[in-house]
Image (cartoon, grey):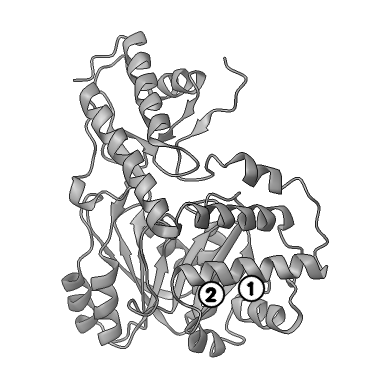
Amino acid sequence: MSTVAPILLTPGPLTTSARTRRAMMVDWGSWDDSFNQLTARVCQQLVTIINGADSHHCVPLQGSGTFAVEAAIGTLVPRDGHVLVLINGAYGKRLAKICEVLGRRFSTYETAEDQPTTASDVERLLRANPSITHVALIHCETSTGILNPLADISMVVAHHGKGLIIDAMSSFGALPIDAQKIPFDALIAASGKCMEGAPGMGFVFAHKTSLANAAGRSHSLAMDLHDQHAYMAKTGQWRFTPPTHVVAALHEALVQYHEEGGLPGRYKRYAANCQTLLDGMARLGIRSFLPDAIQAPIIVTFHAPKDSRYQFKAFYERVKAKGFILYPGKLTEVETFRVGCIGHVSPHDMQAAVNAIGEVLKEMEVQHF
């Protein structure tokens, strides 16, 4: 097996650049002015990506993206609120589980894993249940790669005067979201996704008015976004020990993001990665799970070969030995595997991954047509 680190074709953590990894080689004092300024620059650059500086605060939080989702719900949804959770995959179900654990009333609307929620669905549901205060959805459902129609849904939610909470974990930074065109209470993302930083820091773009009204609402001291923002605004410091190396890596990753051309440049590369992957896998006879119209260029779910000689674990290990780490499927009814298109990878890398997959299937004598 090669001693070279494999390329991560997963939904996060991702393959990062040498420059980003090198940025983690410096130790920072968590209360030092230079680190506080680093944090402030990161937050300012992040909120600029969504054109949200006038309307939203960027509140960073230690932990994975799920920590930030839980913090957003716990801080911004009143304890007597009612969340409509839109589900078409595992992360929508996780969002509902968070509401359950936090004791927030919630209703769910679930569609098939290859079926986006529509604005008309949301219109009907909000008309039928006026007690709903917030709608929560996954923009790009990473369990399949499906893209939900955020702009259309946001207009319906705003028309009804409800709050919108968006899990944009896998879309932020690659797919356009303009806070001046898409009204929302919270949009949630993390350092280790399309920003191509290291994992370990979530962040919530919280509407300034909604956040100001959330004092004392959180279920948790550590996950209180109102308190986190208020303390940082007053002192410039994180309340508790920050992930200093992760912040530094994200700062450097943002430099490279802008060098690439910002969101348009990042989207262009990811779209090229995705098309290279889809075309190459089609030539191998491996079918993608989603139609092109609802396939985001983030991660692609593929039907597993039906040949009994195919076993995911053996397939995974053989592909890993050739330099690529794939991801298991998350579907319950269909056997699948997933290949990510994001991270510091190029269409050339994607073609090399397709070649490796083809070689492995041949070695395993799997009939995959």
Residue 25 image point, x, y percent: 76, 45
Q: Is there CB contact under 8 Å for labels 1 and 2?
A: yes
Cα distance in 3D space between marks 1 and 2 = 8 Å
Q: Name the one closer to the observer, 148 or 248.
A: 248
Is 190 situated above or below 108? Answer: above
Q: Secondary structure at mark 1?
A: loop
204 on left or right of 95: right
Residue 298 image point, x, y percent: 37, 47
Instruction: Please identify the quadrant where the C terminus is shown.
Output: top left
Identify which amino acid the numbered label 2 is placed on: Gly
At horizontal 51% and vertical 58% (from top left) the residue drawn is 258
Q: Is residue 263 visible to us here?
A: yes
Q: Picture quarter containing residue 45? A: bottom right
Identify which amino acid the numbered label 1 is placed on: Ser
Query: In the rendered image, which residue does mark 1 sit on?
Result: 220
Residue 168 image point, x, y percent: 42, 62
Q: Name the one closer to the observer, 214 or 347.
A: 347
Query: In the rendered image, which residue does mark 2 sit on?
Result: 74
96 on left or right of 308: right
Residue 183 image point, x, y percent: 36, 80
Q: Is residue 298 visible to us here?
A: no
Instruction: Please identify the quadrant where the N terminus is shown.
Output: top right
123 on left or right of 254: left
At horizontal 50% and vertical 73% (from top left) the residue drawn is 205
Q: In the image, which disc is placed on residue 70?
A: none
At horizontal 34% and vertical 84% (from top left) the residue drawn is 162
At horizontal 61% and vertical 56% (from top left) the residue drawn is 250
Is 314 situated above or below 63? Answer: above
Callout 1 crowding tier (Cα within 10 Å): few <14, some 14–19, many ≥20? some
Is 131 situated above or below 345? Answer: below
Q: Secondary structure at mark 2?
A: helix
Number of dots carrying numbers: 2
